[in-house]
Image: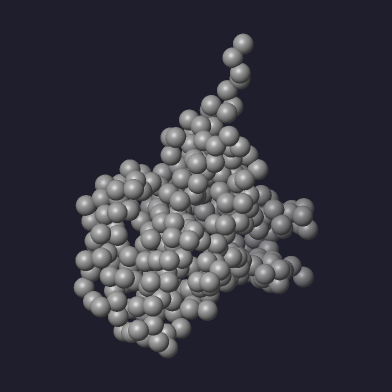
Amino acid sequence: MKRTMQSKVQAYLDRRRALGYQLAETGRELLDFARYSDRRGERGVLRKESAIRWASLPQDAAPAYWARRLQTVRLFARYQAAIDPAAEIPPRHLFGPAHPRKRPHIFPATDVRHLLRHAGRLSGKLRPWTYRTLIGLLACSGMRISEALNLAVADVDLDQGVLRIGQSKFQHSRLVPLHPSATRALRRYARRRSLEFPQAECFFVSDRGLALRYSTVGDTFRDLARGLRSNGDRPQVRFHDLRHTFASRVLLKWQRSTRGAVGRVAILSRYLGHTSPQETYWYLSAIPQLLQQAVKRLAPPPL
């Protein structure tokens, strides 16, 4: 009895989810492809022509979108080919890169001061302190905005100067040690928040004592960043650019030191919550100064 593509995809998803992968969006896309394959009467055999046709839907989408869809099927096809010799693996990069990198905005110190200054002018009793402290924390720690917004009071150890990040982007937990100046700023904010909302469970709260909503914070940040000119490939600066800036500055400082950055990228990778140093290497191309330092270290000694 021939199995359908839907049953094969479901078995693949069940096995990977049993290993801890969530595969929410990937699962939806693969099942959509499976239904497409079954409608074509392919009897559960993965055909690369079908994968390419499905990936290029809709036809007016961007090539990067097609590339991501094809990559999703290709990963499944590699798994399927190991147990079914008839399964065909679609070619790589047929539609170009699946995740083209855009050069981020690297915040000069003047831009960070601009954000902090305008945050201090926000209306509300606690709101100016909330946004000044939040932006300052992102700038000096490289945390993801979602991680900062999800911080509970219990996650912030002001005595040790350490943050506990639980179940972040890749379901990893980690400790983030802070500079004493950052700890002092968090302590000042905590005192003000405790006066207004002593029972608050979230560390960063609104003027009503509730957890900050990501959409609200994003809108406020865009207002605060008005007037800043992006030096990256996007027209507007983003919260995430503070993370890029932090990582790039750390790498630049290390490269300029006598010890260099060799063997230390893994430390930064863990600090940022990356799953592997390979993700952190992207930051090496974020600013020209990093590439200049890399060239100097790789250049042969003079004869």
User: Which residue: 21% across, 66% down?
Assistant: 121
Left or right of 145, for residue 88: right
Q: Position of residue 244 (x, y in %)?
A: 45, 50
Query: Observer-nearest residue: 172 or 148?
Result: 148
User: Which residue: 41% across, 56% down?
Assistant: 139
Q: How is the image coloured?
A: one colour
Left or right of 219, for residue 57: right
Q: Position of residue 246 (x, y in %)?
A: 45, 51
Residue 303 appears in the picture as rendered: yes
Query: Observer-nearest residue: 102 or 54?
Result: 102
Q: Quadrant of residue 30?
A: bottom right
Instruction: Spot the residue most to the bottom.
Output: 199
Count of marks overlaid on the render: 0
Q: Quadrant of residue 92?
A: top right
Residue 49 appears in the picture as rendered: no
User: Which residue: 43% across, 66% down?
Assistant: 184
- Quadrant in the picture for the C terminus: top right
Query: Observer-nearest residue: 88 or 292?
Result: 292
Q: Position of residue 149 (x, y in %)?
A: 43, 71
Query: Observer-nearest residue: 254 or 107?
Result: 254
- Quadrant in the picture for the N terminus: bottom right
Q: Position of residue 89 (x, y in %)?
A: 66, 49
Q: Quadrant of residue 135?
A: bottom left
User: Which residue: 53% across, 26% down?
Assistant: 296
